[in-house]
């Protein structure tokens, strides 16, 4: 194919169906037509051309037909994804299914972790012949996997390579991370992905040179809108406290006469240039406006300042100084926060730069102002306005009248202020992240401060000794300690198993262990959680944003309703996301990082069957120790050095053999719990499955056999028992017949399968009816 002739022309998509604009308005109806099946097959065949190494990575999303925005699917609906947030990405298969379902295309998220770089050539519009020739030479030179873009008017060349940042010139863009690239698999050149090597390096260098130094200098400068005119900015500078120095530099251009804040002279005119731009930048962060104001000054009228390279470098340096200064002010504010326990005792004296670093605007139902480093400390917009009212900026206006502006007003209008939609809890992310539904969020997770004592190994020995007393079998103890250490070392990785510790004798000191762990992980640990009450009411706010949840006494075995509760507990313990239901607050979803540690005195503590893979069980019949022992260890929980030593023990423990995805161990303790978990209803269901002559049974007859009496209309217990019948039946291997069959002259009764589900799920109505009558 002659690329020079093809590029710049409309893409021929006849093999894949009509153009998107020609699609019928009712896309759902189109799914049933033969054309859509051909289009699907063609699309799948094309996507199979994509590099295998890319397809095997979980770095995919999809884009709707007329959009380039990355999307993902949650709860069956398309939501925004992010090119920098891996939690919003999908595997290749899921992205393809989403694209087919919602009518769109798949795309790959380029990151610094993958080996790929992409040359993106865009030939839209009227492209000169010499530039098309250039594009053709680029494709031939790299001789790597190359595909048409979605529009058909450009190409993507895949390479192995790494770039410091993206570069662009004359319709050619080169990048290797933080980009979402829509993929087609529509081949221009069929090849494996090749190394970019020296050719890629040379291309990037040529683009950098052609871009000019000014573009390079501008890349990382934070920017904001021009909110005030040049005259307004200058008026504020002339009326500021350092107005004399500003006039000396801006209007007189006498950099040798001006002094630094410490009274020393500037060592060069370049240093004075930066100081002048810093004064201007206090009122505007727009780099174009700053360059314009700088060049309008006496200092900026020399030939050197007319060069883009120098002017933009000066602006970038000044803004970088501002960032460094804000970070220092943030560090000072954090130290101030560390000295107070109550938010109401904070000293709120601060300037705009400190506000920019330390405040976050959270645009929920009502706007909140949160402290970035104490995200759980927040105020309403009105309350924060009152707190900061004494911070004002005073200046003289053009009429020589003193004016003042609340600094909080300047912050609230500054485009550099940090704004998010919601809060989130994610130990895998930084201060800012995306919520499970893809919205910008302030992360409330912060790593707890920690300083270990020099003799931490000796100090933490009572902790290890008591764990050895509670968990006497060494293999189980090592696994349990690894599980605890995993919480400290990898808080953002939820293991597949949790713990149930059964101590038939009271007074053994298991609550001491819970108290120590609460001191170690502070607000991220919930102890003495009232599990039974939460299961009954479905209110579970206490488990939000927790790494460890301890239940002091659990006894969920026996009756059928407890099996229903155990299913809810399993969801809370194992699912990737959990729904938090708090009184008088709208339900919300958060990522699940909670590990569960359950204590009980009873072997029927938790209903388990022999298929369970979630709960490790430890059963210890030990006798309580002497009262003096418990007095001694309980004195330790209030010693900070002891708590920090326990944390250091868990932080430094070697857990290389710990597999968070491993299923719970099956031991004698767990078998005892499984045996104690059988209720009378469970036993009846298992006996029925073993002895009933027909393989199938009517629902009413199954109910009567399991609960010992037939269902009664209007009876509250009957309604509850119908809900329990499903879990009880499943434990006995009894399945519901899902096929809708007409039996007994046209009726549609509910039928359950006791044995041979493969046969009866596909059986005909007459066969099922005959089996029901078999004796």
Image (cartoon, rainbow, N blue to C red):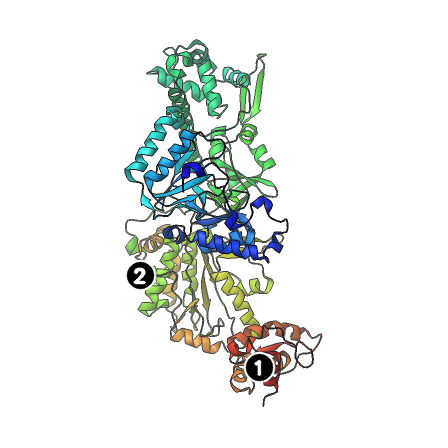
- Residue in the image at 33% along x and 40% along y: 142
- Is residue 477 left or right of 748 when viewed as pictured? left
Q: Is residue 600 above or below residue 712?
A: above
- Residue in the image at 40% along x and 27% along y: 215
Q: Which mark, residue 657?
A: 2
Q: Is residue 457 visible?
A: yes
Q: Which mark, residue 675?
A: none
The quadrant holding residue 246 is top left
**Labels 2 and 1 touching (C-beta < 8 A):** no
Q: Is residue 489 above or below residue 1?
A: below
Q: Nearer the viewer, residue 637 or 237?
A: 237
Q: Is residue 171 above or below residue 680?
A: above
User: Which residue, given by chain and number where applicable, does mark 1 sit on?
Assistant: 696
Location of residue 349 in the rendering, given as x and y in whole percent from the top left corner: 50, 30
- Is residue 271 left or right of 674 when viewed as pictured? left
Q: Nearer the viewer, mark 2 or mark 1?
A: 1
Q: Is residue 312 above or below residue 665?
A: above
Q: Nearer the viewer, residue 555 or 215?
A: 215
Q: Quadrant of the C terminus?
A: bottom right
Q: Quadrant of the N terminus?
A: top left
Q: Residue furthest bottom?
A: 775
Mark 2 vs 1, N-terminal side: 2
Q: Nearer the viewer, residue 554 or 8?
A: 8
Q: Nearer the viewer, residue 139 or 744?
A: 139
């Amino acid at each position: 194919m002659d690329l020079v002739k093809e590029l710049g022309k409309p893409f021929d998509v006849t093999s894949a169906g009509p153009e998107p604009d020609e699609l019928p308005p009712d896309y759902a109806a189109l799914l049933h037509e033969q054309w859509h099946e051909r289009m699907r097959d063609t699309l799948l065949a094309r996507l199979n051309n994509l590099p295998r190494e890319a397809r095997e990575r979980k770095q995919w999303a999809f884009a709707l037909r007329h959009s380039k925005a990355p999307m993902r699917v949650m709860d069956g609906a398309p939501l925004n994804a992010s090119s920098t947030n891996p939690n919003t990405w999908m595997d290749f298969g899921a992205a393809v299914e989403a694209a087919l379902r919602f009518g769109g295309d798949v795309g790959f998220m380029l990151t610094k972790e993958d080996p790929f770089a992409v040359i993106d050539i865009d030939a839209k519009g009227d492209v000169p012949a010499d530039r098309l020739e250039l594009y053709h030479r680029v494709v031939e030179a790299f001789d790597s996997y190359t595909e048409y873009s979605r529009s058909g008017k450009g190409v993507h060349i895949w390479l192995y390579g790494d770039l410091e940042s993206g570069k662009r010139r004359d319709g050619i863009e080169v990048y290797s991370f933080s980009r979402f690239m829509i993929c087609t698999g529509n081949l221009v050149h069929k090849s494996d992905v090749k190394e970019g090597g020296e050719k890629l390096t040379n291309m990037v260098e040529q683009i950098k040179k052609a871009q000019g130094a000014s573009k390079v200098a501008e890349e990382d400068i934070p920017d904001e809108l021009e909110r005030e005119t040049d005259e307004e900015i200058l008026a504020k500078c002339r009326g500021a406290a350092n107005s004399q120095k500003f006039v000396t530099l801006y209007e007189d251009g006498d950099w040798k006469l001006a002094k630094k804040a410490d009274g020393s002279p500037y060592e060069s005119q370049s240093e004075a240039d930066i100081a002048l731009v810093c004064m201007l930048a206090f009122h505007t962060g727009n780099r174009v406006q700053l360059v314009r104001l700088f060049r309008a000054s006496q200092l900026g009228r020399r030939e050197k300042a007319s060069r883009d390279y120098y002017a933009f470098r000066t602006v970038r340096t000044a803004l970088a100084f501002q960032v460094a200064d804000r970070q220092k002010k943030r560090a000072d504010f954090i130290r101030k926060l560390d000295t107070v326990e109550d938010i109401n005792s904070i000293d709120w004296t601060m300037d705009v730069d400190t506000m920019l670093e330390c405040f976050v605007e959270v645009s929920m139902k009502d706007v909140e102002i949160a402290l970035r480093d104490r995200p759980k400390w927040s105020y309403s917009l009105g309350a924060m306005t009152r707190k900061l009212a004494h911070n004002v900026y005073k200046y003289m206006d053009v009429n020589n009248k003193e004016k003042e502006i609340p600094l909080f007003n300047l912050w609230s209008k500054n485009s550099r202020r940090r704004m998010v939609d919601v809060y989130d809890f994610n130990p895998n992310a930084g201060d800012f992240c995306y919520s499970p539904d893809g919205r910008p969020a302030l992360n409330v997770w912060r790593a707890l401060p920690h300083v270990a004592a020099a003799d931490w190994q000796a100090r933490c020995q009572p902790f290890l000794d008591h764990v050895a007393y509670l968990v006497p079998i060494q293999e189980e103890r090592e696994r349990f300690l690894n599980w605890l250490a995993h919480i400290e070392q990898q808080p953002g990785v939820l293991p597949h198993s949790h713990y149930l510790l059964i101590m038939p004798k009271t007074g053994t000191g298991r609550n001491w262990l819970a108290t120590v762990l609460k001191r170690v992980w502070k607000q991220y640990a919930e102890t003495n959680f009232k599990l039974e009450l939460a299961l009954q009411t479905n209110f579970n706010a206490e488990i939000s944003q927790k790494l460890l949840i301890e239940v002091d006494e659990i006894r969920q075995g026996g009756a059928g309703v407890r099996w229903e509760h155990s299913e809810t507990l399993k969801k809370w313990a194992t699912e990737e996301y959990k729904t938090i239901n708090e009184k008088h607050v709208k339900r919300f979803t958060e990522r699940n990082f909670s590990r569960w540690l359950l204590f009980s005195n009873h072997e029927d503590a938790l209903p388990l069957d022999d298929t369970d893979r979630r709960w490790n069980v430890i059963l210890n019949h030990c006798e309580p120790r002497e009262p003096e022992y418990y007095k001694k260890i309980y004195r330790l929980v209030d010693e900070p050095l002891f708590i920090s030593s326990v944390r250091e023990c868990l932080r430094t423990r070697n857990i290389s053999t710990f597999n968070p995805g491993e299923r719970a161990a099956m031991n004698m303790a767990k078998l005892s719990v499984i045996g104690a978990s059988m209720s009378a209803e469970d036993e009846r269901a298992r006996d029925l499955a073993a002895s009933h002559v027909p393989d199938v049974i009517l629902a009413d007859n199954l109910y009567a056999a399991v609960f010992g009496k037939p269902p009664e209309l209007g009876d509250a217990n009957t309604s509850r028992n119908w809900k329990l019948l499903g879990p009880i039946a499943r434990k006995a291997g009894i399945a519901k017949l899902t096929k809708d069959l007409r039996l007994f002259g046209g009726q549609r009764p509910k039928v359950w399968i006791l044995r041979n589900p493969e046969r009866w799920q596909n059986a005909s109505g007459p066969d099922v009816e005959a089996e029901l009558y078999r004796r």
